[in-house]
Image (cartoon, rainbow, N blue to C red):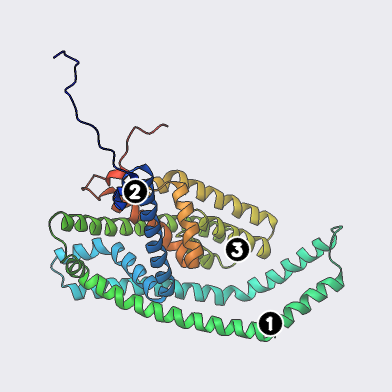
Amino acid sequence: MGLFSRAPQGPVEVVPRAARAPWSLWGDSFGRLATRALQLILVVIVVAGLVFAMTQLTLVIIPVILALILASAFAPAMGWLRRKGVPSIVATILALLAIVVVLGGVVTLIVNAVRNQFGELRDQAVAGFDQVVDWVSTLPFAPTEEQITEFRDTVIDFVTSAQFGSGALAGVSAAANFLTGLVLMIVVLFFFLKDGPRIWEFLLRPFEGQSYARAQRIGDKTVGTLGGYVRGTATVAAVDAIGIGLALAILQVPLALPLAVLVFLLAFIPLVGATLAGALATLVALVANDLVTALIVLGAVILVNQLEGNFLQPVVMGRSLKLHALVILIALTVGTVLGGIVGAVLSVPIAAVAWGIIQVWDGPDTPARMFRQKRPEVA
C-alpha cells in the first residue's frame, strides 16, 4: 500500500431529497438564517407586547419606576443609618421627611416669588409685547390691523368654545391622574426605603447558583447606576440653576428664583433640557427687560453650559453614565415618543441601567459574551 493510496470503499449511497427528514432542511445555511429570523421576530413581538403593556399601565409603572429611582438615590444614606443601628422604620421616616421638607421649601419659594413678582412681570410683558407689535408693524410684510383683530377674535372664540372646555376637562382628568400617581409613588417609595433589601431578596428566591449570583450583580448594578445618575444629575443641575439664577438676580430679571428652579428641573432631560431652560430665561429677560439684558443672560447661559459640559459633567457623571451621545439621543427620542416628558426624563437612566446590566452579565467586570470588545478602539 502506498502512502497516498486509499482503502477500497463501497458504493456511496445517495439519499433522495424527497426521502430526507423535514427537519434536516433547517440544518443548512438558509435554515439557520430562517431560524435566526424567527428568533428575531419573536423577540420583537415580546418587546412590542411589553411596550404596549407599559403604555397601558403608565399610571402604575411610572410611579413605581420613580420610587425605585428615588430609593436608589437614598440607598447610601439608608445603608449608613442601618449600620448605625437606626431601625428601618425610623430611617425611612427621616428620608421621607427630608424629601418633603426640600420639595415643600422649593414649592413655597416658587409660589411666593410668583405671587410677589407676577404683577410686575405682567406689566413689563405687556409693554414688551407692545414694543414687539410696533416693531413688526414697521416691516414690509407686517400684518394689517384687520388681520391682528381677526387673530385676536379667533383666540377669543377658541377660549370660549366647547373645544377649549373639553380641553380644560381633560386637564382636570390629567391632574387627578397625577395626584393618584403621586400618592402611589409615595407609598411605594416608603416600602422601597423600608424593606428594599428584603423585597429584592424575596424576588431572588427562585434563583440558585450562578443565576443567583448574576441576579445579585444585576440588582447591585441597577441601584448603583440609578442612584449615581440621580445624584450626579442633581449636582450638575444645582450648579446650572445657581449660576443662571445668580445672573438673573444680578440683572434684576423678574421671576429669577422660579426660572432657576425650572433650570434645575429641565436639567434632568439630557441634551435638550439645558437649552430649553436657557431659551426660556433669555425670552423672559427680553420681554421683561430689554435686548441688552437678554443678550447678557444668553451669554451667561452659554458660559454655564460650557463649564458644565466640559468640566463638571465628565467628573460627576463619568462613572454613572457611560453612554455614547448617540445612544442618549436615540433613547431620549424613543422615551419622548412613548412617554412624553416623563419618558424623556426616564429614558436615559433606563438605558444606562440596561448597559450596566450587560457589563456585569458574566461577572463583576465581565460583559455578556456578544458585547465584549473584540479589538482595541480606533481613536
Question: Would you say the residues marked 2 and 1 are in contact, meaning their CB atoms lie under 8 Å apart?
Answer: no
At 30% from the left and 78% from the top, the residue drawn is 187
52 in relation to 302, above or below: below
Q: Is residue 128 visible?
A: yes
Q: Quadrant of residue 80?
A: bottom left
At 66% from the left and 73% from the top, the residue drawn is 122
Q: Quadrant of the N terminus?
A: top left
Q: Quadrant of the C terminus?
A: top left
Viewer-side residue, 274 vs 135: 274
**Residue at the farthest front position:** 11
Which residue carries the number 2 mark? 18
Which residue carries the number 3 mark? 253
Q: Is residue 341 visible?
A: no
Which residue carries the number 1 mark? 159
Viewer-side residue, 61 vs 106: 61
Q: Looking at the picture, which amino acid does disc 2 mark?
A: Ala
x and y percent of residue 292 in the render?
Answer: 68, 54
Q: Looking at the picture, which amino acid does disc 1 mark?
A: Val
278 in relation to 151, above or below: above
- Around disc 1, counting alpha carbons within 10 Å, would you say few (fewer than 14), some (14 to 19), or many (20 or more)? few
Q: Earlier in the sequence, mark 3 or mark 2?
A: 2
95 in relation to 40, above or below: below
179 in relation to 288, above or below: below
Tell me the distance, in whole angstroms, between the alpha carbons under discs 3 and 2. Answer: 85 Å
Tell me the distance, in whole angstroms, between the alpha carbons under discs 3 and 1. Answer: 30 Å
x and y percent of residue 169 in the render?
Answer: 56, 85
Q: Quadrant of residue 184?
A: bottom left
Please tell me whether mark 3 or mark 1 is closer to you in this view: 1
Q: Earlier in the sequence, mark 2 or mark 1?
A: 2
- Around disc 3, counting alpha carbons within 10 Å, would you say few (fewer than 14), some (14 to 19), or many (20 or more)? many
Q: Looking at the picture, which amino acid does disc 3 mark?
A: Val
